[in-house]
Amino acid sequence: MADWSPTQYLKFADERTRAARDLLAQVPLDRAGKVFDLGCGPGNSTALLIERFTDAEVTGVDSSPDMLAKAREALPQARFIAGDLSDWQPEEGTDLLFANALFQWVPHHLKVVQRLLTALPKGGVLAIQMPDNLMEPSHVAMREVAASGPWAAKLKHDGREALPQASTYYDALKPHAIRVDIWHTIYNHPIDGAKGIVEWVKGTGLRPFIDPLDENERRGYLAAYEARIAKAYPLMRDGKALLRFPRLFILCVK
């Protein structure tokens, strides 16, 4: 895929950051020395960590140069480094690994999560949130449009694998932790109709479908996709559409 767009991502900064706030509220640390924001993006979640842990050394990690540039501009008091989670290791003495909407994009992420958890010291915390929305109309429509148009040969995969069951995470992580909490939260975001929902997913889930297309194909794909979204998400009385958005949360204490 092309590099991530901070501008597109931040169009819905408040909605995207809400899950990070909810995850951070469950982190059972009064103080922290070293905190890492994995997949920090433009720094919206990093800002929450800086506010919560005022004495900590907070480091954002991301593979996107554009996202890191935006984060450094917004938060000069933090450290931001490039990193690939497939082989990245936390520094010694890390108190918190925080990953908001990251691991759904990491191949074989359960093994990566296990490795990161085992690398933490006793009392260290691993906090994860991932969208669990591949069966929502927003994402079903992505795959249906991909398979039904002249671009089908270019779009033979959906870019993401379905998340494992909560029990799979629990059995994989509990041997390495004294505490494992797993829960789902379903958000219902009021968005400005079908066009607004398309703008939302263009910054994340839609990227594997539109990035491989040329300009004409992309225009055709988006028109067909928006038509399906308009049917799937009827307008409320105030003219908004409710975007149902399930998210999976995992909190581990080493």
Image (cartoon, rainbow, N blue to C red):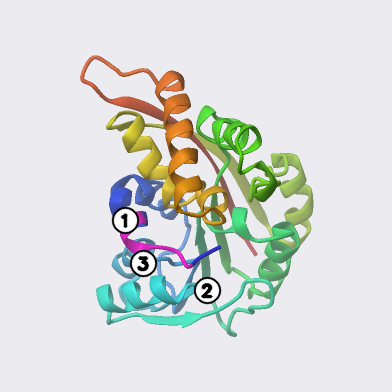
Q: Residue furthest top?
A: 237
81 w.r.t. 231: above or below = below
Q: Looking at the picture, which amino acid does disc 2 mark? A: Ser
Residue neighbourhood size for the residue with mark 1, other residues' Cα within 10 Å, grouped as few (<14), some (14–19), many (≥20): some
Residue at (61% x, 31% y) in the render: 144
The residue lying toward the viewer, choosing from 195 and 134, is: 195
Disc 1 from disc 3: Cα separation: 8 Å
Query: What mark, if any, has residue 63 been given in the picture?
Result: 2
Q: Position of residue 206 (x, y in %)?
A: 50, 46
Q: Assign a secondary structure to mark 1.
A: helix
Decide if residue 236 is on the left or right side of residue 150. Answer: left
Do residues under tags 1 and 3 come within 8 Å of each other at their CB atoms? yes
Residue in view at x 36 percent, y 52 percent = 17
* Whole-percent x, y for residue 228 in the image: 47, 25
- Residue 35: percent from left, percent from top: 46, 74
Closer to the chain start, of discs 2 and 1, is 1
Q: Quadrant of the C terminus?
A: bottom right
Residue range in magenta is 3-8
Q: Dot 3, crowdedness within 10 Å: few (<14), some or many (≥20)? A: many
Picture residue at 38% right of the left edge, 49% below the top: 16
Q: Which mark is residue 217?
A: none
- Reading the image, the residue beneath label 3 is 42
| Magenta-drawn stretch contains 168 | no
User: Do callouts 2 and 1 mark residues in contact (Cβ within 8 Å)?
Assistant: no
Residue wearing tag 1: 10
Q: Earlier in the sequence, mark 2 or mark 3?
A: 3
The foreground one among 210 and 99 is 210
Label 2: how many Cα within 10 Å (few below 14, some 14–19, many 20+): some
Q: Which numbered disc flags the more N-terminal residue, 1 or 3?
A: 1
- Helix, strand or loop status at disc 3: loop
Point out the image quarter for the N terminus: bottom right
